[in-house]
Amino acid sequence: MTSLQSESLSQHAGEAAHAEGHGDHRIFGLATFLVADGMTFAGFFAAYLTFRAVNPLPSGHNYELELLLPTLNTLLLLVSSFTFHRAGAALRRGNHPLCQRWLLLTAALGFSFLAGQMKEYFSLPFGLTDNLFASTFYAITGFHGLHVTLGGLMILIVWWQSREGGRISIDNQFPLEAAELYWHFVDGIWVILYGLLYLL
Amino acid sequence: MTLSLNPSESLQPQGWLRYLSFSTDHKVIGLQYLVCGFLFYLIGGALAGAIRTELVTPISDFLPRETYNEVLTLHGTVMIFLWIVPVVNGAFGNYLIPFYVGARDMAFPRLNAVAFWLIPPAGLLLISSYFVTGAAQSGWTAYPPLSITTPATGQIIWILSVLLLGGSSIFGGINFIATILKLRRPGLGLMQLPMYCWAMLGTSILVVLSTPVLAGTLVLLSFDIIAHTGFFNPALGGNAVVYQHLFWFYSHPAVYIMVLPAFGLVSEILPVHARKPLFGYTTMVYSIMAIVFLGLIVWAHHMFTSGTPPWMRLFFTIATAFIAVPTGIKFFNWLATLWGGKISLNTAMLFCCGFIVNFVFGGITGVALAQVPFDIHVHDTYFVVGHFHYIVYGGTVFVIFASIYHWYPKVTGRLLNEPLGQLHFWLTFVGFNLCFAPQHWLGLNGMPRRVAEYDPQFTLINQFSSAGALLMAISTFPFLINVVMSASNGAPAGDNPWNALTPEWLTSSPPPVENWHGEPPLVHEPYGYGVTPGELSLEASSGRDLWNLGQGDQR
């Protein structure tokens, strides 16, 4: 047997073995990772709540935040979870153009959220090092904003891949499903964050 | 489909070069973890040698005080994050778990390679900080405000390095959970898995739940250092105790991340060399899971002197004392496994017995430390240093050596030299106990830890301790000679020198690239020693029968 033949046979056998023994557990792996990621936020929230309980702010500083913009932002993210879900449903019906349109709308909502967050940052009366609450506020919302940024880029990649004849199809939904799971996670974290930082 | 040639063999570099490649083979990655970890163990050991040399005399003469702080910080960080955690999880986990679940590789082989290759750069970054900018000086705990006031560059490099290692650890944990839960061979139930799988499942749950909290905390600490925020800096209105809570929320489970896999490995080695089934399999499984749960809710017992309120002290004392119950169950199970067994006192078995002796001692001082009045008396003294080393060295490192003696024939196809192994064991055992047992006395009498100078009344006992450290350093040489020489000159081991029944021994030694010649065997009873095959109800195609047919029953 020539080495070339041997190689192609080996590759084939390797793939067969992997297909049989190694099912696709990537969504399970991602979910486990998101548990870990969620624990990072849990640590931040725990720190924030403890600070708030035991470390009084200097006089003249308070925990009040403007509510209108973040509430609108919350709505944007909630709607974007819904539009992402519609994109997945469109893909499962094989309707690539519709899927792409929903994805683009989702990305637009995500980046609008970031723009709103920026606007809020620039209109706040405190800076990063002004007091303990200010530092915690910027650290937590910034870390969440980093997640939204990564998620927005992911959606754009998935949008490109789900064009007709692209990598994503009914037979290979993983990239879209993974990005969707991640996006719902980022959305869910924001809801907790909104409750703890803005409403509490 | 049965193939005589190994499927993906032609796709990867061959020979020793593959150990320097981005290989996705779990066995290669396992050995990469082990060798890389051992090199860092030698560095960490040299640092420990520097510490013990300094402490031979009561004055600071061998190392300047600041250098001493850097050395002890590096020693702790290297030993924990670059030797014990990667080796006891990454090395043995990667090598053994796919065999134990009957798979050809881990669930995510590329993620696995990424997880390993985060370690060498992180380690080099950490070590090089000593030479380039000066290393961190605030100990492996990096408590603020000390870590904020000591030189910033070294501390930031330390944080970066630990973040990389934490990421590696999380990726590894995700991989182990997915492999154990999702990649089991059809027909293999959870309660038929070898105990090390359970230990690694529990450990990985701890890794995934607690490591991210440390990562987030260190990011906040780096903000305090670079951006002058005040999260943990009381001078800026922050709260240093919150750092301690978040740090120990990881670092107490980290003790179980270092010790639970060792429990699993001992549970694999003892039955083989005692020729008896592992006693109390079910209670072992529940004990591991109980330790995982309790391990997450005991962290503040490290903080009894940090102004913790009485209710918190009470809760954490009780929760900590409870951990002694599942741990005790495991120890009695191991003793019952040995009881009446046909014990071969080879090196692997000796190291396991050494582990049992040392860990019981470290466990008892641990229960003592959980009691608030006693803890306040010995907090931040050498008693804690002694206790901790009995757990991680007397416990885990002894098991790492036992595992190397046990699985060396699996990896190389050759046996390690027994007389050299026994010399290694006795030097290590005597040296270890001589080094760390006296430290309990030092701590009880008030010698604080982490300082280069001490009261002259402690000189003699410190010299005993340093003599023990010297013996431990010497003990490394017979081991190194043994490991290197036996790779080419050791007695051929055959496929299964210990007549073991766990699945990794049911293939050739060393194993082929995708582990099995043909289908993975189904092993219902990995610990079915001392029972004739006829008494076991097994499928005709089980691995045990395959092995019996191939090897003849020599039990």
Image (cartoon, coloured by chain):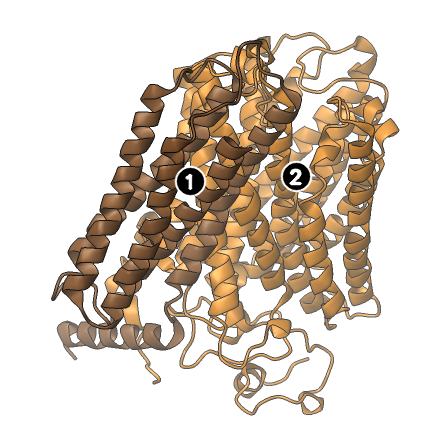
Chain colours: A brown, B orange
* Crowd class of label 2 (few under 14; some 14 to 19; many from 20; radius 10 Å): some
Q: Tell which of B207 and B461 is nearer to you.
A: B207
Q: Tell which subunit mark 2 falls on.
A: B
Q: Name the residue under label 1.
A: B119
Q: Which of marks 1 and 2 is nearer the N terminus?
A: 1
Say if B441 sits above or below A7 in the image: above
Say if B288 sits above or below B378 in the image: below
Q: Regarding mark 1 in the picture, which secondary structure is present there?
A: helix
* Crowd class of label 1 (few under 14; some 14 to 19; many from 20; radius 10 Å): many
Taking the spot 18% from the left edge, 63% from the top edge, the residue there is A98
User: Which image quarter is the N terminus of chain B in?
Assistant: bottom left
Taking the spot 82% from the left edge, 29% from the top edge, the residue there is B310
Q: Tell which subunit mark 1 falls on.
A: B
- Measuring from the top left, give residue A127's x and y in whole percent: 41, 16
Taking B353 as reference, is A196 left or right?
Answer: left
Which quarter of the picture shows residue B133?
A: top left
- Measuring from the top left, give residue A167's x and y in whole percent: 18, 63
Report if residue B113 is visible in the image. no
Q: Type of residue at label 2?
A: His
- Measuring from the top left, give residue B270's x and y in whole percent: 70, 63
Taking the spot 48% from the left edge, 38% from the top edge, the residue there is A193
Check whether the beta carbons of the residues at disc 1 and disc 2 lie within 8 A of each other: no
Taking A104 as reference, is B421 left or right?
Answer: right
- Measuring from the top left, give residue A51's x and y in whole percent: 60, 24
Q: Please give the label number shown on residue B252.
A: 2
Q: Type of residue at label 1?
A: Ile
Q: Regarding mark 2 in the picture, which secondary structure is present there?
A: helix
